[in-house]
């Protein structure tokens, strides 16, 4: 299942997902076979080889791939929903050109496999918001969502046209204790734990009843590694697979935190991210994902909260 000959390049390895993914892939392949690339050095990954890389620099990317004999690329460099809305033209450039640069490496046979994450942001206000199916109306209203939706179409096109082995998941909001989130709308669900432990109070930028799909980072990393190691014929969808995770509101997660920290309080002061959250589904259907390559998540809200508080404390 794990080819120890593989050499992996993670682009955007210093981010919320990259740090945890690099650590897990290092356990499987050995840290010397997992090369971490980002704009700046990554202290949390000091056992991995590091390459300073701007993914928009195609020549520099190819040089790194050749230098290390890279066979697989995980492309994580992107602007997320909140930062994307603040800088839409750059978000479009980074999210699209970065993807083209990596897909072209595979098209030109420099590498054999690509992982690129999509997001629940591909859905929009006209999408059925409860138990959102794999195939449905997709009219995203953020630049981030538009770039992810376009990225999905390009991935599928490169697969059909050039046989590029690209695999992708539509992550919900990710919650982990090892790394900090990087500018999304779901970031509140990480910040809340830090503030609960530090100050016993949190001011949330979404309203109390804003339900969103979320997932423990451990589940997300496992899903990523599983889809990348699934037999090719099981990966029938080459745009991106739905992942359901757990759906909850700020009020529900606060109630769960209060079971561990009884004097924890939450207040609500919605900002521009409320409109983004309101445009996204409240819950996701992952039947196709389960059916095609056997995905099963582990965490519920109660176990996620307990795990976060225990580890952060
Ligand atoms: P993040 O913002 O935490 O990390 C992104 C990393 O990319 C950062 O370390 C940044 O320095 C790096 N980067 C930015 N521009 C770069 C460039 N030009 N060249 C090289 N590196 C660059 O993001 P994340 O949360 O780890 O997300 C990774 C991917 O997963 C993104 O595509 C994101 O859209 C997707 N995703 C994340 C979530 C989530 O909840 N975290 C949910 C859905 C999808
Ligand atoms: C964000 O909020 O932008 C991300 C995502 C769900 O894609 N966490």
Image (tube, rainbow, N blue to C red):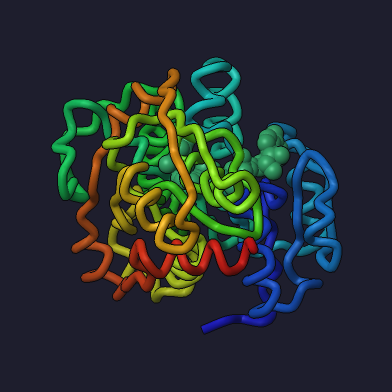
Residue 133 x %, y %: 17, 49
- Does the rendering let one see residue 77? no
Residue depicted at x 28% and y 62%: 236
Report how many numbered discs are placed on residues in the image. 0
Residue depicted at x 48% and y 48%: 264
| Residue sitting at the far front | 263
Residue 145 x %, y %: 39, 30
Residue depicted at x 50% and y 54%: 175
Left or right of residue 113, residue 126 in this image: left
Between 229 and 284, which is closer to the camera in this rendering? 284
Residue 119 x %, y %: 40, 43
- Does the rendering let one see residue 8? yes
Left or right of residue 2, residue 291 in this image: left
Residue depicted at x 62% and y 56%: 73
Quadrant in the picture for residue 281: top left
Quadrant containing the C terminus is: bottom right
Between 311 and 294, which is closer to the camera in this rendering? 311
Quadrant in the picture for residue 312: bottom right
Q: Quadrant of ligand 2?
A: top left
């Amino acid at each position: 299942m794990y080819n120890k000959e593989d050499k992996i390049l993670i682009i955007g390895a210093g981010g919320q997902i990259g740090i945890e993914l690099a650590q897990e892939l290092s356990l499987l392949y050995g840290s010397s076979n997992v090369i971490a690339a980002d704009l700046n050095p990554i202290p949390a990954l000091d056992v991995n080889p590091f390459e300073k890389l701007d993914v928009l620099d195609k020549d520099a990317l190819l040089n790194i791939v050749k230098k290390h004999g890279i066979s697989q690329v995980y492309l994580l460099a992107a602007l997320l929903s909140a930062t994307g809305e603040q800088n839409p033209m750059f978000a479009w450039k980074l999210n699209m050109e970065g993807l083209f640069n990596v897909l072209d490496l595979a098209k030109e046979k420099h590498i054999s496999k690509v992982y690129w994450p999509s997001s629940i942001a591909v859905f929009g206000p006209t999408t059925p918001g409860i138990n959102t199916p794999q195939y449905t109306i997709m009219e995203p209203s953020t630049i981030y969502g538009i770039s992810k939706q376009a990225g999905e179409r390009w991935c599928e096109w490169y697969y059909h046209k050039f046989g590029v082995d690209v695999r992708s998941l539509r992550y919900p909001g990710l919650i982990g204790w090892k790394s900090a989130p990087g500018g999304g709308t779901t970031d509140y669900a990480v910040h809340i734990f830090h503030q609960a432990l530090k100050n016993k109070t949190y001011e949330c930028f979404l309203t109390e009843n804003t339900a969103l799909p979320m997932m423990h980072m451990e589940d997300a990393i496992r899903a990523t590694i599983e889809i990348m190691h699934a037999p090719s014929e099981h990966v029938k969808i080459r745009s991106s697979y739905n992942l359901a995770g757990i759906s909850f509101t700020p009020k529900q997660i606060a109630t769960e935190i209060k079971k561990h920290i009884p004097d924890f309080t939450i207040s609500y002061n919605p900002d521009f991210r409320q409109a983004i959250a309101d445009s996204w589904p409240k819950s996701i259907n992952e039947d196709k994902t389960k059916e095609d390559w056997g995905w099963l998540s582990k965490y519920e809200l109660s176990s996620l909260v307990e795990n976060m508080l225990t580890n952060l404390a």
